[in-house]
Image (tube, rainbow, N blue to C red):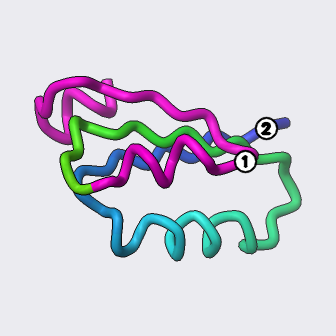
Amino acid sequence: MKISIIVPCYNEASTIKLILTQIKDEPLTLEKEIIVIDDGSTDGTKKILENQKDITYIDLKQNKGKGFALR
């Protein structure tokens, strides 16, 4: 079985690496996939996420809010 961890983010350049490290390091008995949805960040978050391995990255061009990003 696989668990999907969905991380919506907006302007999190200063914290996104730490967040992803903590998620990746969490010991789980299930296989996990990390899906990060960038909700139109303007602070460099996109550049950081594009270089991350082992995640699925979705780039929303315009900020529409957390609810939209999760849907």
Badge 2 crowding class, 10 Å Cα cut-off, few under 14, some 14 to 19, many 20 or more, is few
Q: Secondary structure at mark 2?
A: strand
Q: Which residue is mark 1?
A: 53
Circle 1 or circle 2, nearest the eye: 1
Question: What residue is drawn where x is 24% and y is 51%?
Answer: 10
User: Which of the two residues, 43 or 25, is positioned nearer the viewer here?
Assistant: 43
Question: How many numbered callouts?
Answer: 2
Task: Name the quadrant of the C terminus.
Answer: top left
Question: What residue is drawn where x is 84% and y is 46%?
Answer: 31
Q: Residue 18 placed where, x, y %?
A: 52, 76
Q: Residue 40 placed where, x, y %?
A: 22, 36
Q: Residue furthest left?
A: 64
Task: Tell whether 28 sits left or right of 50.
Answer: right
Question: What residue is drawn where x is 34% and y is 40%?
Answer: 38
Callout 1–callout 2 Cβ contact below 8 Å: no
Please check the rendered image and state whether residue 5 is part of the magenta-colored stretch, yes or no: no
For residue 16, above or below residue 44: below
Task: Tell whether 26 sits left or right of 62.
Answer: right
Question: What residue is drawn where x is 51% and y is 48%?
Answer: 49
Q: Quadrant of residue 27?
A: bottom right
Q: State the extent of the magenta-drawn residues as a range.
A: 44-71
The three-letter amino acid code for the residue at tag 1 is Lys
Q: Which mark is residue 41?
A: none
Query: What is the CA distance from the residue labelled 1 to the residue labelled 2?
Result: 18 Å
Q: Which residue is mark 2?
A: 2
Q: Secondary structure at mark 1?
A: loop
Q: Earlier in the sequence, mark 1 or mark 2?
A: 2
Task: Name the quadrant of the N terminus.
Answer: top right
Badge 1 crowding class, 10 Å Cα cut-off, few under 14, some 14 to 19, many 20 or more, is few
Q: Residue 11 placed where, x, y %?
A: 23, 56
The three-letter amino acid code for the residue at tag 2 is Lys
Q: Quadrant of residue 8?
A: top left
